[in-house]
Amino acid sequence: MLRKSIFLLIAAILLIAATQLWAEPKPSGRVEALRGTVSFERAGKLEDLKAGDPVFIKDRIITGAESAAEIVFVDQSRMKLAANTDLEITGYLYDPAGKIRQGLISLTSGKARFAVEDLHGFNDRRFRVQTRTAVVGSRDTDFIVAYDQELARDEVCRDGLTAALCLENSIIVTGLEFPDKPALLSANMISRVCGPDFPTPPRFATAAELARILAGVD
């Protein structure tokens, strides 16, 4: 009798695990608005993206020329993609019960703006954007990250150039090869990471720089 009860218990556990394994994945967010030609790659298949569509972890989103898209994540954080941008939602964990929000966006090329929701009382609310040269981290602010991979042809910036602009509160910019030399940026400050170098000292962006970086994501 005891052996039978143990067998039934194990069978029930395996059934629950299988149900969870094959359950439909939950969306990380949805497309609120788009303009022009915007596509997404999911499981190796490329399709057009439409307003209202859900987006998931590992989705690659690509905007064409004179195109743009805005995505609202499950925690109400927002992401705006400028034209000619290619990025992936590498990770997005939102657990209100556990008071955790962890977002990771991989920017391959182009420019995107991130308005990160301030989740009061959350123990972990990290939101990061990674390029081939830098990681930009935030918890509750508005910032822009641009990555130009064409500069990889230049020996100095052989891995491309990342530019980060903080619009509110603060962000941390870290070069991938120099994690111990971060740059802390406050509102209207800019920093760049060229190839394997560490971030340039934070400085206030000029009016011309602000206008240029905000173009397409304002």
Image (cartoon, rainbow, N blue to C red):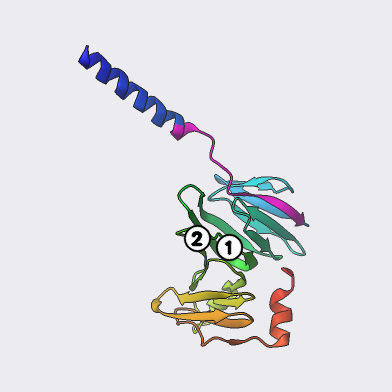
Residue name at image x 45 percent, y 33 percent? 20
Q: Magenta span has 30?
A: yes
Residue name at image x 72 percent, y 68 percent? 217
In the foreground, 102 or 176? 102
Q: Is residue 210 left or right of residue 75?
A: right
Residue 88, image quadrant:
bottom right
Q: Is residue 84 above or below residue 92?
A: below
Q: Quadrant of the N terminus?
A: top left
Residue name at image x 21 percent, y 16 percent? 3
Q: Magenta span has 66?
A: no
Q: Earlier in the sequence, mark 2 or mark 1?
A: 1
Q: Which mark is residue 118?
A: 1
Q: Position of residue 67 (x, y in %)?
A: 75, 61
Q: Position of residue 118 (x, y in %)?
A: 58, 63
In the foreground, 23 or 46? 23
Q: Is residue 72 above or below residue 205?
A: above
| Pointer 2 local density, CA inside 10 Å: few below 14, some 14–19, many at least 20 | many
Look at mark 2 in the image and give the residue it sits on: 125
